[in-house]
């Protein structure tokens, strides 16, 4: 009798049932990556200067990126013409923090237009993004 | 008639395979596009009225000049970064609580500049300002 019942059970089981533990794990992984990871535009040729500074990089509405080829980007868009002109279009006040991501091997003179523009804007806080030296 | 009867009678079995497909695609997307690197920062609190000092001669006091080879100049004296004489000078500035302006030579790399800033911070100087680069 019991043999008959188990046989019938095995018949109704389908292959999907075996996948449920796997789906559980896949869902867990999915949720982990969704919550723990930050989605950022990938730029493999970007290497930020390494530093021992442990101050966390804050979120900011103004992000200036200087890529390895020296091209300036403001909030992910290439800057046409003068940087200060593009910056003036954005809303700023004394509390505004400007974040500058600059490639580590560029000469220091590439920071000049950024410094000039930030000063002209009247913003007093400039942060240079770094990577923690390992 | 027959068809509808068959439909209602058939036990509803939703296959999980399409769901897994979608979940896998989402998983792959999030795995590949997310980054776990936490970025740090070095902050400058440059006063906006500092504009006039930018054009001033680089031999101004409280100014650290960074050369392209990584050495620094203070008061027209050239030091190695680890030089105790430099630490002495920095200590004096630290006691006076002045804002130290860092000026890099145009050819010095950003990495060198950041390393110098790290060094200054290690010496206790937190009031840092960065001025435009200087062409020797």
Image (cartoon, coloured by chain):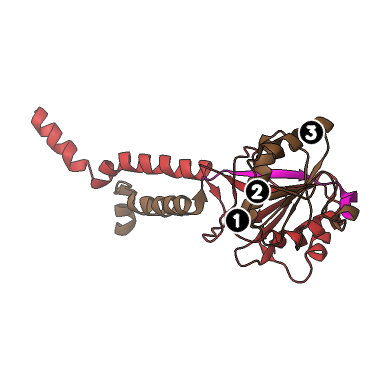
Chain colours: A red, B brown
- In terms of depth relative to the viewer, which is nearer, A52 or B57? B57
Mark 1: secondary structure: loop
Residue B114 - label: 2
The reply to the same-chain question for discs 2 and 3 is yes
State yes or no: residue B39 in magenta.
Answer: yes
Expressed as whole percent of the image width and height from the top left, the position of residue A100 reads: 69, 53
| Residue B40 appears left or right of B23 | right
Q: Is residue B72 visible?
A: yes
For label 3, the residue is: B92
Residue underneath mark 1: A104
Task: Compare residues B129 and B33 and report the one nearer the observer.
Answer: B129
Q: For numbered disc 2, what is the local secondary structure?
A: helix
Residue B1 visible in rendering: no
Q: Nearer the viewer, residue B117 or A129?
A: B117
The span from disc 1 to disc 2 (Cα, nearest Å) is: 9 Å
Name the subunit of mark 1. Answer: A
Q: Is residue A64 magenta?
A: no
Residue extent of the magenta highlight:
B36-51
Q: Residue furthest top?
A: A2
Residue at horizontal 65%, vertical 42%? B118
């Amino acid at each position: 009798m019991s043999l008959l019942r188990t046989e019938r059970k095995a018949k109704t089981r389908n292959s999907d049932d075996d996948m449920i533990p796997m789906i559980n794990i896949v869902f867990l992984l999915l949720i982990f990556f969704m919550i723990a990871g930050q989605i950022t535009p990938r730029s493999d040729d970007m290497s930020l200067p390494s530093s021992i500074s442990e101050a966390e990089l804050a979120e900011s509405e103004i992000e200036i990126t200087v890529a390895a080829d020296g091209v300036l980007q403001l909030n992910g868009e290439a800057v046409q013409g003068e940087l200060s002109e593009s910056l003036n279009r954005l809303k700023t006040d004394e509390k505004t923090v400007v974040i500058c991501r600059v490639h580590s091997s560029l000469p220091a003179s590439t920071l000049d237009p950024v410094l000039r523009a930030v000063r002209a804007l009247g913003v007093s806080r400039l942060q240079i993004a770094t990577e923690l030296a390992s | 008639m027959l068809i509808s009867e068959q439909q209602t009678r058939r036990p509803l079995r939703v296959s999980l395979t399409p769901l897994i497909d979608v979940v896998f695609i989402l998983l792959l997307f999030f795995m590949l596009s997310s980054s776990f690197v936490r970025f740090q920062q070095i902050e400058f609190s440059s006063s906006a009225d500092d504009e006039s000092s930018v054009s001033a001669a680089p031999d101004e006091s409280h100014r650290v000049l960074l050369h392209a080879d990584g050495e620094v100049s203070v008061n027209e004296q050239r030091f190695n970064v680890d030089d105790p004489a430099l630490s002495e000078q920095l200590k004096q500035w630290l006691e006076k609580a002045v804002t130290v302006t860092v000026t890099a030579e145009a050819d010095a790399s950003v990495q060198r500049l950041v390393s110098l800033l790290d060094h200054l911070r290690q010496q206790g100087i937190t009031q840092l300002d960065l001025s435009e680069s200087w062409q020797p």
